[in-house]
Image: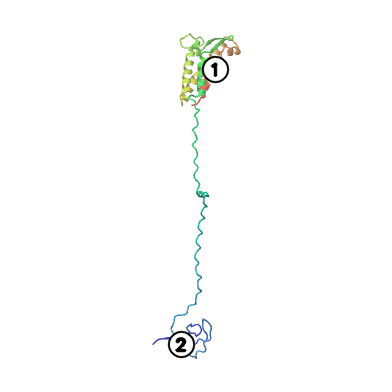
Amino acid sequence: MAATTRYCPNCGLERREGERFCRNCGAALGTGATKLHESPAASPVTPATEPMPPVQAAPAPAPAAQPAAGAAAPLPAPPSAPHPVVQAARAPRSSTTLPFKPLALGGGLAILISTFLPWISIEGLPSSNALDVPIEFLWSLEPSDGPIKIGFVTLALGIVAVGLSFVPRMNAIRRICGSVTLAVVLGFTLQMYRSLDAAGLPIADIFSAIGFGAPLALAGAIVTQIARS
């Protein structure tokens, strides 16, 4: 047998036994003793949905304006990313480095020149240069006139100092040349003081007896020592 269901006559909601009002729409259903409205089984009524508005098509883009006859064509838009700026290569700086060390060269030349200048001056008159003073004068008050002179030593030291001024990284050898020259000049000065003091001359006469060759050799020795490559 086909089963029948009982529904509300107003909204069609299935009614329970004994209900007097509809649970959905509140319509009066009468007493439970009254005969219910019977209808064949059907699917519950779904609420109607609002109709969707019609979809409007997007307007077609307007055609690009064509340039008039004889008018210049528009320039293309610039690129979004900037182009890298290429810097011009700088010209190399001209090297001004000298092939020699001026300070070392000056010290060596001073030693060379001092060899030929007066080292002993008698009564204010130059009388002897380093090539005339024997090497024994450095440690003996009564030296013999031997073949080796102080000037030969200072001349050799000056030549070495001048040559080393053209060679880099020769500080140690230049310092040795300056130290030997310094020892020769100080030894000569000490011996002059001892010999003239033994003769009873005052200290002013002692310094006046030393020619200007020895001080120049002393200055050259100091410059040669402090020169750097």
Q: Judge depth for marks 1 and 2 and give the one in front.
A: 2
Depicted 224 relative to depicted 117: above or below? below
Colour mapping used in the image: rainbow
Residue at image position (53%, 18%) is 218
Q: Marks 1 and 2: CB-CB under 8 Å?
A: no
- The label on residue 38 is 2
Extreme-left residue of the structure = 1
Viewer-proximal residue among 60 and 50: 60
> Mark 1 falls on what kind of element?
helix
From this viewpoint, is residue 198 visible?
A: no
Residue 61 position, x and y percent, is 50, 60
Label 1 Cα neighbours within 10 Å, binned few <14 / some 14-19 / many ≥20:
many
In three-dimensional space, the C-alpha distance between marks 1 and 2, rounded to whole angstroms, equals: 145 Å
Closer to the chain start, of discs 1 and 2, is 2
Residue type beneath disc 1 = Leu
Label 2 Cα neighbours within 10 Å, binned few <14 / some 14-19 / many ≥20:
few
Quarter of the image with the N terminus is: bottom left
> Mark 2 falls on what kind of element?
strand
- The residue to which callout 1 is attached is 216
Q: Is residue 2 left or right of residue 222?
A: left
Residue at image position (51%, 17%) is 111
Depicted 176 relative to depicted 67: above or below? above
Residue 223 position, x and y percent, is 52, 22
- The label on residue 200 is none
Residue at image position (46%, 87%) is 38
Viewer-proximal residue among 202 and 179: 179
Residue 200 position, x and y percent, is 59, 10
Residue 12 position, x and y percent, is 48, 83
From this viewpoint, is residue 38 visible?
A: yes
